Image: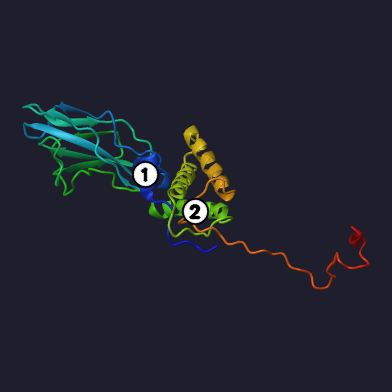
Amino acid sequence: MEESDVAYSTQQDMEQRIGLSQLTALTNDVWQVSAPGSVVATAATGGSLAIDTYYYVVTAVSEKGETVQSSEVSATTDGTKKTIELTWATVPGARAYKVYRSTTSLSYTTPCLVGETTALLYDDDGSVSPLLAGAPTSDAFLPNAAVIATLIAKADHLIDAKAGQVYTVPFTTVPDVVKDISADLACYFALQRRPVNIEMPKAWDEAYKHALEQLEDISNMLLRLPTTATIESAESNIVTPTTDPIVDFNDSDNAMSDY
């Protein structure tokens, strides 16, 4: 069985099954790092912000990167309240948080980064000028391509071990059913990387069992693949012995000759 240069499924196939955010978390060993929630902005006394309405979003930063923006919040300063106090809920897996400010709703282009903190609050009192950074509109970290390639290769090796009993593998033209099996197996293997305190989703236990059943059916030719899949030519391993005499039922000394 040769090594295949072509994977039977793709990262996109996996994303369609378990979602981009979950695939990112599983392949980066960071489970569900999401944007901060419950963000609140309140005007407070003191500070030096000009009188205006200020808009804010907050992101979480993990060892793998920065999340998308939180929901936007706003507060308005006046003659005595020139500080905006921000609070938010903790994000599991986050090591810090970034605060972005704008005077235009939903517009967080550079410069707008006013602070980074490990706490769950930040006071924007106007003492810090926005830095040259814009708030990310999508997760700054993505699925780990190397891990995904390993998961798909593991799935494809299992497919080749079963299908190779009947068909020539690796497949040069990948049948749709093989593509689906590869993606389902790779997703199941990805979900095996989940934290130990989270159970395997029952739907994926069933999907894994179904994929194995399909492979058994393929190896037993109960599930026939398209004609683009080449059936292995079976050559007989029977060897005619050359040392033992061949029985001739027409010999006169053979008892069977009487019948």
**Looking at the image, how many numbered discs can be counted on the residues?**
2
Q: Which mark is residue 76?
A: none
Q: Position of residue 83 (x, y in %)?
A: 14, 31
| Residue nearest the viewer, comparing 129 with 111 | 111
For the question of whether residue 24 can be seen, the reply is: no
Left or right: residue 254 versus residue 194 is: right
| Residue nearest the viewer, comparing 204 with 117 | 204
On screen, residue 95 above or below 75? below
Q: Quadrant of the C terminus?
A: bottom right
Element type where label 2 sits in the image: helix
Q: Residue at x 73, y 67 (%)?
A: 239
Foreground label between 1 and 2: 2
For the question of whether residue 106 can be seen, the reply is: yes
Binning the other alpha carbons within 10 Å of mark 1 as few (below 14), some (14 to 19) or many (20 upward) gives: some
**Residue type highlighted by circle 1:** Glu
Residue, disc 2 = 156
Element type where label 1 sits in the image: helix
Dot 1 or dot 2: first in sequence order is 1
**Residue type highlighted by circle 2:** Asp
Binning the other alpha carbons within 10 Å of mark 2 as few (below 14), some (14 to 19) or many (20 upward) gives: many
Q: Quadrant of the N terminus?
A: bottom right
Q: Position of residue 182 (x, y in %)?
A: 46, 49
The Cα–Cα distance between marks 1 and 2, rounded to whole angstroms, is 18 Å
Q: Position of residue 247 (x, y in %)?
A: 85, 66
Left or right: residue 46 versus residue 187 is: left
Q: How is the image coloured?
A: rainbow
Residue, disc 1 = 15
Label 1–label 2 contact, CB within 8 A: no
Q: Quadrant of residue 228?
A: bottom left
Q: Quadrant of residue 116?
A: top left
Residue that sits furthest to the bottom in the current view: 243
